[in-house]
Image (cartoon, rainbow, N blue to C red):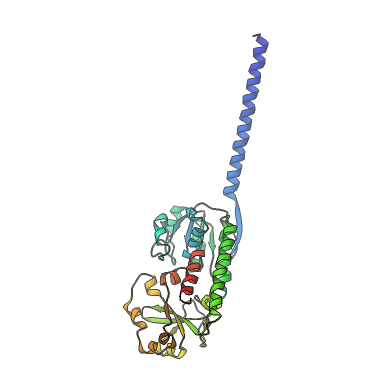
């Protein structure tokens, strides 16, 4: 082969390698740009404090609310959750506890554990609202709370918000549609129930009554049970009531939630609360309509896809 031919071949090889290198470099740059864009992508959500910008589809999330945790599990985003309140989890979530780091309780976060976890996003509810600014020193914080005056509306909003954040909007819409169907099925039953209903919370030997607009108000406002005639204070903690007051209200259906049992401290006082002559005189007792609800579900959780489903299911089971 002549010398000039060898030179041309060498130059062609050099140009080919250079072109390949440029193409590979461009591809790597494109991949890097895509990854950077994904990691830096954000979405604006309305939470309890207003508009907030949070990471989109984060992969390392701390969730200090059982309802929001069960929503993420239902949306197939369980692997994105790295930390939660693992102690005293309600029974329906208990088998997931070992998958997560313990980063506090529903009422008090473990700031050191959260800092070590270094999450991209922290999701809380109103229980931890006072800690929001402190937690924002670690990561963006979103406060998704339930509005007791519009329980189902706020639950839908929270599910939708999580669907947007985690790029699961279609799954969120489907879950909401399914819950709507379950609600309508219960409403069809309660339309034929005229008995006056009261919800009672037992706590260390005392009783609190709940009606419309309260933490258990969706029993009336959403599911369609008729509240008792008595004016019950709209309060997160309910209105304190004694035996004579309970008899005066005289509910015909009585739902009971045992807070003491929910937080894991059995109480003989609570167990004996409803074993009383005043209670025996109520229409609810006479008609065998005192219904004990799953306390850990109803007191510790709620407002999530799975927890709301379980609550509706539990109510529906008693009114076939």
Relative to 119, 173 lies left or right: right
Of 178 and 164, nearer the camera is 178
In the displayed orientation, state which residue is furthest to the left.
268
Of 74 and 303, nearer the camera is 74
Instruction: Using the rendered image of the protein, determine whether residue 147 is visible from the camera's viewpoint.
Output: no
Residue at screen point 43% across, 74% down? 293
Residue at screen point 57% across, 69% down? 181
**Quarter of the rendering containing residue 25:** top right
Q: In which quarter of the image is the N terminus?
A: top right
Where is residue 80 drawn, in percent x and y?
Answer: 49, 53
In the displayed orientation, state which residue is furthest to the front.
320
Q: Check the image and report above or below for 173 versus 209.
A: above
Where is residue 22 drawn, in percent x and y?
Answer: 63, 31
Residue at screen point 50% across, 59% down? 74
Instruction: Using the rendered image of the protein, determine whether residue 144 is visible from the camera's viewpoint.
Output: yes
Residue at screen point 62% across, 25% down? 17
Of 53 and 249, nearer the camera is 249
Q: Check the image and report above or below for 275 versus 103.
A: below
Where is residue 26 drawn, in percent x and y?
Answer: 63, 35
Of 286 and 175, nearer the camera is 286
Question: What is the count of numbered marks?
Answer: 0
Where is residue 191 drawn, in percent x and y?
Answer: 56, 80
């Amino acid at each position: 082969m002549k010398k000039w031919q060898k030179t041309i071949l060498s130059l062609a090889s050099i140009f080919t390698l250079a072109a390949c290198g440029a193409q590979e470099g461009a591809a790597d740059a494109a991949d890097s740009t895509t990854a950077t864009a994904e990691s830096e992508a954000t979405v604006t959500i309305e939470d309890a404090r207003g508009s907030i910008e949070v990471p989109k589809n984060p992969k390392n999330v701390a969730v200090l609310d059982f309802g929001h945790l069960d929503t993420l599990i239902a949306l197939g985003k369980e692997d994105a959750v790295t930390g939660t309140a693992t102690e005293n989890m309600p029974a329906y979530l208990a088998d997931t506890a070992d998958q997560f780091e313990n980063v506090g309780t529903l009422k008090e976060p473990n700031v050191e554990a959260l800092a070590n976890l270094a999450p991209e996003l922290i999701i809380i509810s109103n229980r931890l609202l006072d800690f929001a600014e402190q937690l924002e020193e670690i990561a963006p914080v979103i406060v998704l709370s339930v509005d007791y005056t519009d329980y189902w509306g706020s639950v839908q909003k929270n599910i939708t918000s999580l669907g947007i954040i985690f790029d699961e909007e279609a799954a969120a819409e489907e879950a909401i549609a399914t819950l709507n169907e379950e609600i309508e099925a219960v409403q069809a039953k309660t339309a034929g129930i005229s008995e006056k209903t009261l919800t009672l919370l037992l706590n260390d030997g005392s009783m609190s009554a709940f009606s419309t607009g309260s933490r258990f108000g969706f029993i009336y406002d959403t599911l369609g049970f008729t509240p008792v005639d008595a004016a019950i204070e709209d309060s997160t903690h309910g209105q304190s009531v004694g035996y004579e007051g309970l008899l005066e209200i005289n509910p015909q259906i009585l739902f009971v939630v045992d807070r003491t049992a929910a937080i894991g401290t059995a109480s003989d006082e609570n167990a004996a609360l409803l074993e009383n002559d005043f209670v025996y005189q109520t229409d609810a007792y006479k008609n065998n309509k005192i219904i004990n609800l799953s306390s850990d579900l109803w007191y510790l959780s709620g407002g999530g896809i799975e927890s709301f489903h379980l609550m509706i299911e539990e109510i529906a089971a008693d009114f076939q």
